């Protein structure tokens, strides 16, 4: 571990990785990356590297878990043992159980669960490398995987955190800022419906700072949403252009 | 929101809420009656039982010595666990903790941890080697909705009631002496949960409301009226306006409870 | 009362397509007089109806659909059949035997066994019940030869083409019999495996380039070229 830096933001307002307060980390999204899944996506968000896959809708196993009037969504968020500095045990931690639940609940509002009663979808998220903000990056990727599986959706879900580092409210905290900062507010948004589907917070914020953080996180979500749409379209436009060039 | 019975109830609840009323006679911004009883488990270092309407939660604390986390060698450790005891509800099953009990424990944990309620720096015995570990065990005894607020209240009430053993270090060994001091606390966070039913926010949802509401939001508020932890739950959503409204209500309700409890 | 898309524009879930006096067609939904896309696809306006031709979807059974399925399990009075849908289909023994089924005499696995392929029609299906199949019509029943391929079910109309133009062209050029399961499973039976593969290649290309124009001409061209190569050998 590096020594704890004195300041997380310098006099010019630059963060440790050189970003401005309202600047996102570089983001790369790719759709349809896994052959065996019904839908899949890969995200690189800063140093986070995460795969998401969707199977279904399909019959539930075991069958008694199915519901007569709606589709059941199961979600597993899991971190690879090598994804962090110290090896993480592959057994699911309490943190992973909680995150699996909140990620699922952040995506459920985007689905028409009543359309396919007695079925289920399984959502698998594997964090290959973690560097702060993995729940948000996971949601962004998982929503794309659902779209790629052709499952009807109300909107794509984009997620981004904001928080407080030193005395400043900033967007999209990376690991060190998350650990040493004052507060972290992960948020997920369906931008076209103006619906917040995930909101958590830890650390201490005044009501004013909280409002500022929510607005900043929503702005981040909107930027990420535009990239999600691009990534989805790219998968299909690539074929179109190839043909037109002939 | 899955059976026909609850659909009928949903309509009933919705119609009442539109008029600012609730099935159990409360207004949409009212808490149920709160009763707190402390120190009822003698063998625990601290304990408290909270009744929130018919919801009943018992919290016991134990203090042991153990190793600190490597990144905080000078601080004591907080461990929160929650048990949805099968006798509390027909929907609770015996077995290892499920996602609901894990989420509950982590929400209670975050409220205490992020508000820095426990002066963990005073729980260090030997830096990097030996510290006090505070175990907070949440026992849900009757489930009638809003386990989060009841558990968070009971946890803080139990911590307020917790006795720290006197000790001395001899040749690197911790010796527990007779007598106690109180556990050093710096803050008393209060968690306020709101449910969303048909676009309306209600305070302290009880069981029947929980069964029809599409989402909830919980906020832990400290003495200064600042927010120190938030958790959204459920498969619905909030508009940004509703979140800000929820924040205002939570801060107001926490202050109200704080006054009532003398915290 | 505007629409917010160009004809055949690629749209993503959640994209606002129209506002006001329009009808929500396929792969769209309406909320407060606004119509949004619910799948990635190509937006289109048909009179007042806004549709999205999905680029990705899965098969949902409809009564009367012809599907191709795989027998999963032999039960005590019928079979369960995988039809590549969210629901497993059932085929009753009495439907195949065309007479009352007698458990003491009839060994079902000798009629159809796990792994067998069948062409069948959806006889009944609703939200509360799994789809039931029938094979009691000409052209339906167990498949004994040919090659099977799977395409995204939404691409089947493109493989058929306008008034069946695409599929009859492929049949003509390759001399293969082709059965299109609406669940995206396709059976191709030709005079030799080479011709079957030729047809499969054409269909694969249609699937990949389904949303481009001039496709029939390109596929015809391709088939003619490849067939010439094949016949030279």
Image (cartoon, coloured by chain):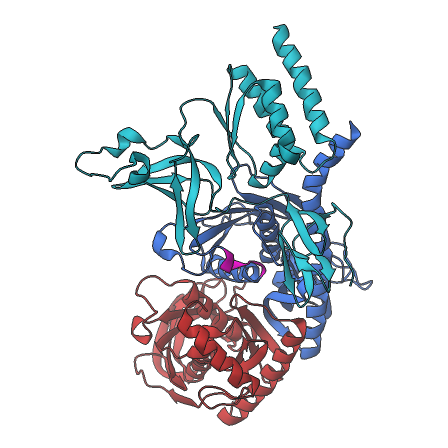
Residue located at (35% from left, 86% from top):
B39
Chain A hue? blue
Q: Quadrant of residue B158?
A: bottom left
For the colour red, the matching chain is B
Q: Does A114 lie within the magenta span?
A: yes
Left or right of B166? Residue A35 is right
| Above-or-below relation of A148 to B199 | above
**Magenta span covers which residues?**
A110-115
| Above-or-below relation of A94 to A213 | above
Left or right of C183? Residue A154 is right
Left or right of C39? Residue B47 is left
Where residue C53 appears, as percent x and y from the top left, is 65, 46
Left or right of B263? Residue B133 is left
Chain C hue? cyan
Residue C206 shows up from this direction: yes
Where residue A50 appears, as percent x and y from the top left, is 59, 47
| Count of marks placed on residues | 0
Q: Say which of C175 and B6 sits in front.
A: C175
Q: Say which of B172 and B202 sits in front.
A: B202
Residue located at (40% from left, 70% from top):
B82
Where residue C226 appears, as percent x and y from the top left, is 65, 16
Residue located at (41% from left, 88% from top):
B36
Where residue C199 appears, as percent x and y from the top left, is 58, 23
What is the quadrant of the C terminus of chain A in the image?
A: top right
């Amino acid at each position: 571990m590096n020594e704890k830096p004195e300041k997380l933001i310098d006099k010019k307002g630059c963060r440790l990785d050189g970003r401005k307060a309202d600047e996102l980390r570089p983001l790369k999204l790719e759709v349809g990356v896994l052959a065996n899944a019904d839908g899949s996506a890969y995200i690189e968000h800063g140093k986070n590297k995460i795969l998401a896959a969707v199977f279904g809708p399909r019959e539930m196993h075991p069958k008694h878990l199915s519901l007569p009037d709606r589709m059941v969504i199961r979600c597993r968020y899991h971190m690879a043992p090598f994804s962090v500095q110290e090896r993480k045990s592959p057994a699911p931690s309490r943190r992973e159980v909680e995150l699996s639940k909140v990620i699922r609940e952040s995506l459920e509002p985007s689905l028409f669960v009543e359309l396919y009663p007695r079925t289920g979808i399984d959502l698998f998220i594997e964090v290959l490398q973690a560097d702060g903000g993995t729940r948000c990056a996971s949601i962004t990727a998982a929503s794309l995987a659902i779209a790629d599986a052709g499952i009807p959706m109300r909107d794509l879900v984009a997620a981004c955190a904001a928080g407080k580092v030193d005395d400043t409210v900033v967007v999209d905290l990376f690991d060190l800022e998350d650990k040493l900062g004052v507060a972290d507010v992960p948020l997920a948004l369906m931008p076209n419906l103006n619906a917040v589907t995930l909101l958590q917070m830890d650390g201490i914020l005044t009501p004013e700072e909280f409002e500022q953080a929510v607005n900043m996180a929503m702005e981040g979500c909107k930027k990420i949403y535009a990239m999600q749409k691009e990534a989805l379209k790219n998968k299909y436009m690539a074929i179109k252009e190839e043909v037109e060039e002939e | 929101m899955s059976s026909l019975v609850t659909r009928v109830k949903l309509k009933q609840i919705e119609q009442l809420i539109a008029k600012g009323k609730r099935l159990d006679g409360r207004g949409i911004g009212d808490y149920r009656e709160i009763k707190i009883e402390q120190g009822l488990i003698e063998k625990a270092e601290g304990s408290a039982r909270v009744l929130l309407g018919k919801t009943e939660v018992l919290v016991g604390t134990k203090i042991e010595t153990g190793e600190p986390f490597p990144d905080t060698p000078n601080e004591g450790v907080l461990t929160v666990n929650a048990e949805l005891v099968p006798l509390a509800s027909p929907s609770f099953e015996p077995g290892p903790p499920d996602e609901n009990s894990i989420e509950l424990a982590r929400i209670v944990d975050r409220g205490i941890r992020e508000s820095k309620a426990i002066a963990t720096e005073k729980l260090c015995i030997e830096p990097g080697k030996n510290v006090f570990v505070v175990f907070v065990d949440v026992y849900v005894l009757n489930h009638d909705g809003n386990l989060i607020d009841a558990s968070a209240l009971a946890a803080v009430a139990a911590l307020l009631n917790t006795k720290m053993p006197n000790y001395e270090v001899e040749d690197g060994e911790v010796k527990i002496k007779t007598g106690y001091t109180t556990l050093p606390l710096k803050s008393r966070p209060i968690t306020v949960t709101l449910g969303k039913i048909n676009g309306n926010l209600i305070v302290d949802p009880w069981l029947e409301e929980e069964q029809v509401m599409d989402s909830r939001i919980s906020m832990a508020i400290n003495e200064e009226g600042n927010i120190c932890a938030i958790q959204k739950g459920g498969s619905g959503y909030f508009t940004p306006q509703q979140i800000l409204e929820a924040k205002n209500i939570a801060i107001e309700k926490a202050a109200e409870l704080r006054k009532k409890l003398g915290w | 009362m505007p629409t917010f898309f160009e004809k055949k524009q690629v749209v993503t879930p959640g994209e606002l397509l129209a506002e006001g006096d329009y009808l929500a067609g396929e792969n769209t939904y309406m909320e407060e007089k606004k119509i949004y896309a619910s799948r990635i696809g190509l937006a289109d306006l048909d009179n007042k109806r806004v549709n999205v031709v999905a680029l990705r979807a899965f098969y949902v059974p409809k009564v009367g659909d012809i599907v191709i399925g795989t027998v999963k399990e032999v039960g005590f009075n019928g079979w369960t059949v995988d039809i590549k849908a969210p629901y497993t289909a059932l085929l009753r023994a009495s439907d195949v035997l065309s007479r009352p089924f007698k458990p003491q005499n009839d060994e079902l696995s000798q009629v159809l066994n796990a792994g067998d392929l069948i062409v069948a029609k959806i006889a009944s299906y609703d939200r509360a019940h799994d789809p039931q199949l029938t094979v009691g019509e000409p052209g339906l029943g167990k498949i004994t030869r040919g090659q099977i391929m799977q395409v995204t079910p939404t691409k089947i109309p493109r493989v058929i083409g306008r008034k069946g133009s695409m599929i009859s062209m492929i049949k003509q050029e390759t001399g293969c019999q082709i059965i299109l399961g609406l669940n995206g499973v396709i059976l191709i039976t030709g005079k030799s495996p080479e011709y079957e593969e030729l047809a499969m290649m054409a269909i694969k290309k249609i699937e990949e380039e389904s949303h481009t124009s001039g496709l029939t001409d390109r596929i015809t061209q391709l088939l003619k070229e490849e067939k010439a190569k094949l016949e030279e050998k």
